[in-house]
Amino acid sequence: MELLKISAINDIFVDAYLVDEANYLLFLSLWGRDTALQEFIARLSLPASENGIRDFHVVGHGHDRYVQIPNVDMLDKTTAKTSGNTIFGQLTQLWIYDKQAVKPDMSNRRAMMLFRESDNPDPWPTVKTVCHLPLLDHWREAFLNCCHKREWLRKLDKGFGMSGLLIELGDDDVESAITEMIRNRELMLEPEKEPESIIG
């Protein structure tokens, strides 16, 4: 497993991370001793004047990415310890992630899907959850194409070992786009029927 490091603190290793277009942190997976990780968590909440961490670089193996920390209220965390002692002692894994990855922001109609680079999850169930209008399942292909075209559904790929999808359906044009697609018969209220076979 290839590991990177962060510039802000020693003895912490990164096996995956993801940032948005402005390099704000969306996901970070860290390994290290519990004391080092607890120090990192504590410094995220401190102002820069008190040795707080507001940004850092992920570095290693020719990799160098500048990462900014958003408002910590937007982030959540989960930890897990290794089952036994390793040659480095007992290690802890820490995941820090944007809360929208586990709970959509329904008031702003935003959600985020995080996944390994090798995965290709279907965004349709999440799009249906976030959208304030009912979406019929046979609209899937046409409406997802519309979301991509209007950038309501965007790929997040600035990272290492992780990718994501950002779903933003708070645009006032969502309702008018659906109405127009129905008017143009791009979205049908009933699914098209397969032609009946004439072969007996």
Image (tube, rainbow, N blue to C red):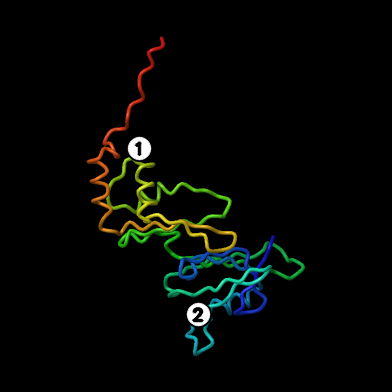
For the residue pair 40 and 122, the one nearer the viewer reads as: 122
Residue 54: mark: 2
Q: Is residue 106 left or right of residue 72?
A: left
Q: CA distance from mark 1 to mark 2?
A: 45 Å
Instruction: Name the residue carrying label 1.
Output: 138
Residue 153: mark: none
- From the top left corner, tell me how far across and down residue 63 is, in percent: 63, 68
Q: Quadrant of the N terminus?
A: bottom right
Kind of residue indicated by mark 1: His
Which callout, 1 or 2, points at the residue further toward the start of the chain? 2
The image quarter containing residue 108 is bottom left
* Residue found 49% across the figure and 69% down from its top: 25
- From the top left corner, tell me how far across and down residue 130 is, in percent: 34, 54
Up/down of 153 relative to 35, above or below: above
* Residue found 46% across the figure and 56% down from its top: 155
Under tag 2, what secondary structure? loop
Up/down of 92 relative to 121, above or below: below
Up/down of 56 relative to 169, above or below: below
* Residue found 71% across the figure and 63% down from its top: 84
* Residue found 33% across the figure and 58% down from its top: 109
Under tag 1, what secondary structure? helix
Identity of the residue furthest to the bottom in this view: 49
